[in-house]
């Protein structure tokens, strides 16, 4: 880089480093900077600093002819270092471009990532004078990629079955995935993995965070890492730790590898949903590192305390909160989302701690700018939008309060179903709402049953097997004295804590897992299955395995419960084959024209209709739900009317066996058993009005074929 660098004015948009085949346009936003330099690094690490002298509406920009794709770069941003004013500029720190599409490597704390002197009495007031180059550099990318005939599957939400998984954990131990591909995007795209997912029957893979993240120093000091990745460093570049190309020495190849994964999953009809973390970053609080946003324009990107902007509002429990009240930060999020849809072809997003994004001054506001701009966006308004509808701030629990077009992780569903099968009483009324799509939460604001993302387990908490095997968390491996993770798990160990040789306990656990899976996949709404639950994966009682990049978290493909796996596959096939199990509209509860039956009806085990007293009775632990196959009033994607068999779902969390009377209707004379959680091999056919034995803690599903 001995030749003088020619700088043309360039353009303020798009932000980031944009290669046009002949040169690169660099653009970066900073309201409070006094000077900005883009720093170009050669293969030996030699640096050439190029001032960006043009400013347009606080965007610093310049075009450098001759710079090619593959160029490594960072920024030095000048301005006041004054923490009391919320200003943390330090040009001694090389900063990562917030819009970088690829990174050249991982963070290196030994080379420096802090803008202040560590370990002094002045804390973050002592500006560091030494050069800091521990932050990964951005890499200019060539976005060319042959997508061929790739198409977004566009599976309707009511037909969707979500599978939540971690890119690395899913394939790290898979024997049929080549060793060099295990734990990577390429491993997930391998035919062995795609075939497994397709055979399972799910329609969408929801990937835990794939944005590049930081391994926090406090974890590294304990010999642990940030396995889950909820510590975002950049919102555009795919995580290198999950890239086979990066392991081969080609970090930019991670972008291509991710696209190839999406293309392979799409070819199998599977959607890709990303778990995204736009509520905070890995820069932490006032004592955290300076990696990107903090050193570029701290007041723009973060929510600072008004009367003392040295400090950060923390609605996330991580030290900082992104300032979505600022138009530029909001633009950053929107540009990132659109990039992952348009350039990377993903099908939707699950927003971590989404209530944080909706906060105005402090309160969660359904009319916030974030929701408004997404609602109007021609790209994002047509992909799947799923909220984790809570954060750790006051008033942050917002289940049921997100706007139209948003689905939500239904934490109420999880808690209710866990409590019911645990054997708690007084839940009949609540159970009725959860089985029918939670109309109490979603019907009043124009949404449909599919807005309820139903789940029993998720990455955060016990796995399904651990839910039926442990009363208490066992997080000792996290090295926090078992103080981390939830204490209210609503779990039941069925009589023994952890693994046991007791055959009665193990039989009960097997039945309880089937009860949970059947309830999940036979409820109205959109089911989300935690990856590995389909074959009984355990985390040894750890309900907060965020730092366990090891066998605790990785899927153990050598310990697959084949019977449970086949049971799950059969449940998904049944769900897909019966439109009455994934209705597009809420039940009306009114009689169907030309019939005496209603679209949904409720019965006690003696065959009598449920009364108000039954619904409120604290001792009610069983009920039956009748779904009328001729009460759909819906059409398929081709506009053809949908019809189905009549279905009858029986649930009993009682510790006693019960005899259930099968209802009798003029048009329904015979009931055929489809599911029995007490016996996978069971086969029953009954005349209407006859009884069936429902063993203790069992679910059964019957069908009545319609002529």
Image (cartoon, rainbow, N blue to C red):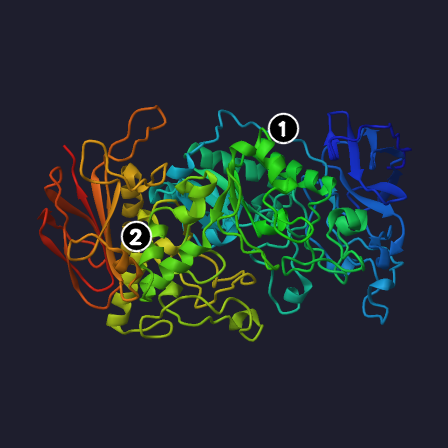
Badge 2: how crowded within 10 Å, few (<14), some, or many (20+)? many
Q: Nearer the viewer, mark 2 or mark 1?
A: 2
Q: Please tell me which residue is depicted at 29% across the width and 55% down the height of the picture.
A: 564
Q: Please tell me which residue is depicted at 77% across the width and 46% down the height of the picture.
A: 300
**Residue 175 shows which numbered tag?**
none
Outermost residue to the front: 612
Compared with 243, 392 (above or below) is below
Badge 1: how crowded within 10 Å, few (<14), some, or many (20+)? few
Looking at the figure, which quarter contains the C terminus? top left
Numbered-mark total: 2
Compared with 550, 79 (above or below) is above
Residue to which mark 2 is pinned: 518
One can see residue 292 in this view: no
Judged left or right of residue 680, residue 205 is right
One can see residue 102 in this view: yes
Give 116 or 379, whichever is nearer the viewer.
Answer: 379
Give 508 or 239, whichever is nearer the viewer.
Answer: 508
Judged left or right of residue 695, residue 366 is right
Please report whichever mark, 2 or 1, sits nearer to the chain's N-terminal start: 1
Residue 228: give x, y in percent of width and height: 56, 56
Give 140 or 642, whichever is nearer the viewer.
Answer: 642
* Secondary structure found at label 1: loop
Residue 438: give x, y in percent of width and height: 39, 48
Compared with 634, 96 (above or below) is below
Judged left or right of residue 344, residue 462 is left
Q: Pointer 2 and pointer 1: residues touching (CB < 8 Å)?
A: no
Q: In the rendered image, which quarter is residue 620 located in? A: bottom left
Residue 366: give x, y in percent of width and height: 58, 44
> What is the spatial separation of the Cα atoms under label 2 and label 1, in whole angstroms?
45 Å
* Secondary structure found at label 2: helix
Residue to which mark 1 is pinned: 144
Looking at the figure, which quarter contains the N terminus? top right
């Amino acid at each position: 880089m001995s030749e003088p660098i020619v700088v043309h004015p360039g353009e303020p948009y798009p932000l980031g480093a944009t290669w046009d085949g002949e040169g690169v346009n660099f653009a970066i936003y900073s309201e409070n900077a006094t000077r900005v330099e883009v720093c170009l690094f050669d293969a030996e690490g030699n640096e050439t600093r190029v001032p960006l002298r043009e400013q347009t509406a606080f965007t610093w920009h310049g075009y450098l002819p001759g710079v090619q794709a593959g160029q490594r770069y960072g920024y030095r941003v000048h301005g006041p270092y004054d923490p009391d004013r919320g200003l943390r500029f330090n040009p001694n720190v090389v900063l990562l471009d917030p819009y970088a599409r690829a990174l050249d490597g991982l963070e290196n704390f030994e080379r420096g990532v802090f803008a202040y002197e560590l370990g002094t009495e002045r804390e973050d007031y002592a500006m560091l004078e030494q050069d800091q180059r521990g932050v990964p550099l951005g890499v200019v990318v060539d976005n060319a990629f042959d997508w061929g005939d790739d198409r977004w599957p566009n599976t309707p939400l009511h037909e969707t079955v979500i599978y939540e998984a971690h890119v690395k954990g899913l394939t790290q131990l898979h024997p049929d995935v080549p060793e060099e591909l295990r734990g990577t995007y390429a491993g997930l795209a391998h035919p062995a993995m795609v075939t497994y997912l397709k055979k399972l029957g799910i329609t969408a893979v929801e990937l835990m965070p794939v944005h590049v993240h930081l391994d926090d120093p406090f974890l590294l000091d304990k010999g642990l890492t940030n396995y889950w990745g909820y510590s975002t460093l950049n919102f555009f570049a795919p995580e290198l730790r999950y890239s086979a190309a990066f392991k081969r020495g080609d970090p930019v190849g991670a972008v291509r590898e991710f696209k190839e994964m999406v293309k392979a999953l799409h070819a199998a009809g599977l959607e890709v949903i990303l778990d995204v973390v736009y509520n905070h970053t890995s820069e932490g609080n006032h004592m955290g590192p300076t990696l990107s946003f903090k050193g570029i324009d701290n007041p723009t990107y973060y929510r600072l305390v008004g009367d003392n902007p040295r400090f950060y509002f923390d609605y996330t429990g991580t030290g900082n909160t992104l300032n979505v009240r600022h138009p530029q930060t909001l633009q950053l999020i929107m540009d990132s989302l659109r990039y992952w849809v348009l350039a990377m072809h993903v099908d939707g997003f699950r927003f971590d701690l989404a209530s944080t994004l909706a906060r105005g001054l402090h309160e969660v506001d359904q009319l916030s700018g974030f929701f408004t701009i997404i609602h109007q966006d021609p790209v994002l308004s047509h992909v799947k939008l799923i909220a984790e509808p809570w954060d750790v701030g006051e008033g942050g629990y917002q289940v049921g309060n997100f706007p139209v077009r948003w689905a939500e992780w239904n934490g109420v569903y999880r808690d209710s179903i866990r409590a019911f099968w645990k054997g708690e009483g007084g839940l009949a009324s609540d159970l009725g709402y959860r089985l029918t799509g939670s109309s109490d939460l979603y019907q009043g604001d124009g949404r449909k049953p599919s807005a309820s993302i139903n789940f029993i387990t998720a990455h955060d908490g016990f796995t399904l097997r651990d839910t039926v095997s442990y009363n208490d968390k066992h997080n000792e491996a996290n090295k926090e004295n078992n103080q981390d993770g939830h204490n209210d798990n609503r779990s039941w160990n069925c009589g023994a804590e952890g693994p046991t040789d007791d055959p009665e306990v193990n039989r009960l656990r097997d039945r309880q897992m089937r009860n949970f899976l059947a309830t999940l996949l036979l409820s109205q709404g959109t089911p989300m299955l935690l990856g590995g639950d389909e074959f009984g994966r355990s985390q040894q009682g750890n309900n907060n395995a965020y730092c366990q990049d090891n066998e605790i978290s990785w899927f153990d493909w050598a310990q697959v419960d084949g019977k449970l796996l086949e049971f799950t596959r059969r449940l998904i096939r049944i769900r897909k084959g019966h439109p009455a199990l994934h209705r597009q509209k809420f039940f009306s509860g009114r009689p169907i024209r030309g019939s005496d039956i209603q679209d949904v009806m409720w019965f006690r085990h003696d065959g009598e209709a449920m009364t108000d007293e039954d619904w409120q009775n604290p001792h009610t632990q069983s009920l039956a739900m009748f779904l009328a196959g001729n009460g759909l009033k819906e059409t398929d994607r081709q506009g053809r009317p949908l019809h189905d068999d009549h279905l009858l779902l029986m649930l009993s969390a009682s510790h006693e066996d019960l005899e259930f009377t099968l209802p009798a209707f003029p048009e329904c004379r015979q009931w055929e058993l489809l599911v029995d959680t007490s016996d996978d091999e069971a086969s029953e056919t009954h005349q209407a009005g006859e009884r069936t034995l429902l063993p203790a803690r069992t679910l059964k599903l019957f069908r009545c074929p319609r002529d």
